[in-house]
Image: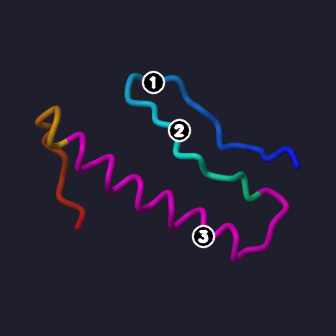
């Protein structure tokens, strides 16, 4: 089966998170992918703060 991947946006900080495209799947599948994205964004924020000294607002 040929699986779709979420789009790669072409920025210096790009990282292929390997998430499956939930199009056509259940709401539960969308929720799972959204939670994975949320977690990965939090990791990305922490990495940016650590490596670039970013002054991002505290969200947690």
> What residue sits right under mark 3 in the picture?
32
- The earlier-in-sequence mark between 2 and 1 is 1
Where is residue 50? Give x, y as percent. 14, 42
Residue density around tag 1, few if under 14, some if 14–19, many if 20 or more, within 10 Å? few
Q: Quadrant of residue 4?
A: top right
Q: CA distance from mark 1 to mark 3?
A: 25 Å
Q: Answer with mark 1 or mark 3, whichever residue precedes in sequence.
A: 1
- Tell me the crowding category of disc 3: few under 14, some 14 to 19, or many 20 or more residues within 10 angstroms, Cα based: few
Q: Quadrant of residue 58?
A: bottom left
Q: Residue furthest bottom?
A: 28
- Quarter occupied by residue 59: bottom left
How far separated are the C-alphas under marks 2 and 1?
11 Å
Left or right, residue 4 beside residue 57: right
Q: Position of residue 41 (x, y in %)?
A: 39, 52
Give residue 11's mark: 1
Whether 58 is among the magenta residues is no
State the residue at coordinates (50%, 57%).
Answer: 37
Distance from label 2 to label 3 (Cα)? Answer: 17 Å
Element marked by disc 3 = helix
Going from N to C along the chain, the mark reached first, 2 or 3, is 2
Model colouring:
rainbow
Secondary structure type for disc 2: loop
Please state the extent of the stretch shown in magenta in the rendering: 23-48
Depth check, front residue: 1 or 43: 1
Q: Position of residue 26 (x, y in %)?
A: 79, 73
Q: Which mark is residue 16?
A: 2
Q: Nearer the viewer, mark 2 or mark 3?
A: 2
């Amino acid at each position: 089966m040929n699986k779709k991947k979420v789009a790669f946006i072409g920025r210096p900080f790009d990282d292929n998170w390997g998430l499956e495209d939930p199009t056509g799947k259940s709401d539960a599948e969308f929720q799972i992918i959204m939670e994975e994205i949320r977690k990965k964004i939090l990791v990305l924020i922490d990495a940016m703060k650590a490596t670039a000294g970013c002054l991002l607002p505290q969200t947690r």
